[in-house]
Image (spheres, rainbow, N blue to C red):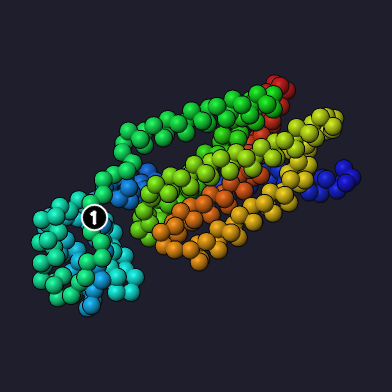
Amino acid sequence: MSEQKLKILYPMKYYWVYFVISLCVIIPGTYSLIRYGLKPSIDFTGGSTIVWQTETELGDADVTAAVSSVGAVITDVTREGSKLSITTSPLESDAYQKLRADSRVVAAKITELEYQNVGPTLGSELINKTILGIALSALLIMTYVAYRFKDFRYGASAILAMFHDSLVLLGTFSLLGHYAGIEVDTLFVTALLTILSFSVHDTIVVYDRIRELKKHHGYLDFVDIINRALVETMGRSINNSLTIIFMLLSMYLLGGDSIRHFVLALLIGTISGTYSSTFTAAPILVLWDKISSKRKIK
């Protein structure tokens, strides 16, 4: 490929556009995260799960009123045909029997399929340890990447791209939680950690190509090397991500309700990770290089 052709394919010419796109996605999600937070599932809060089969319809208003009459609070109600699933604040056995005896519930002619009290599986101590573990992992990843590529900029850019993906995922689920009632559970935490590792992995592919080009084409400007590396790795990154996205789409459309939100989190994270490895990590390197060059001139 000639140098003239390489200049035609210049993805970093408008690197600032990629920052604007990222901000357009991150700002609404971050605002939602600050104002509304995430909607925690029973895994975080603990509570009771009730599943009834109803012969006649039991409306949401009647369910809410019946549960409130025994001193509990509803956190989620889902329906699947005549099957009614209710998640409430902790509901002891005596209170549950009073709920079943409520006239509105009796009129619906319910059949109990499930009733259980669930304690929070993710306590505050475990959550704090998880956050600490992520922070420590990020520090170690940044240090290792900087060491392997002999440049601190690589490590810092990789971590910034990783946090870009985490903000996209957290912000999206905050919006979905507020407007669509989607909750975060232990599977969401698993998806978040998986996406963070995917993000770094995809970024390293680009960095490795930059390193190889610097070794063999050191006479080129650093930004030109980044452009050439992106052109040469973009096809591979997109093809690799598409195979994952198609699989996740199939699971989302055909899989059961129990894993749907988990798959959705992986899908959002995969798309964000594919974007950030090319259009977040690399532009950060370009911006960093431009700032460093200006300082050297001064």
**Number of callouts in the render?**
1
> Is 111 on the left or on the right of 174, as rendered?
left
User: Which residue occupies the foreground of this view, 21 or 262?
Assistant: 262
In the rendering, at what x and y percent does residue 166 appear? Answer: 49, 43
Which residue is found at the position 43% from the left and 48% from the top? 188
In the rendering, at what x and y percent does residue 70 appear? Answer: 11, 58
Which residue is found at the position 78% from the left and 38% from the top? 224
Residue 104 occupies quadrant: bottom left
Q: Is residue 228 above or below residue 244?
A: above
Q: What residue is pinned by disc 1?
A: 116
Residue 51 occupies quadrant: bottom left
Q: Can residue 135 be seen in this snapshot?
A: yes
Tag 1: residue type? Gln
> Is 247 on the left or on the right of 185, as rendered?
right
Q: Can residue 28 be seen in this snapshot?
A: no
Q: Is residue 112 above or below residue 231?
A: below
In the rendering, at what x and y percent does residue 194 appear? Answer: 52, 44
Q: Please, what secondary structure does the residue beneath circle 1 have?
A: strand
Within 10 Å of disc 1 (Cα), the crowding (few <14, some 14-19, many 20+) is some
Q: Is residue 78 above or below residue 39?
A: below
Which residue is found at the position 61% from the left and 54% from the top? 244
Residue closest to the far bottom: 56
> Is 175 on the left or on the right of 236, as rendered?
left
In the rendering, at what x and y percent does residue 6 appear? Answer: 83, 45
Residue closest to the far right: 2
Residue 95 occupies quadrant: bottom left
Quadrant placement of the C terminus: top right
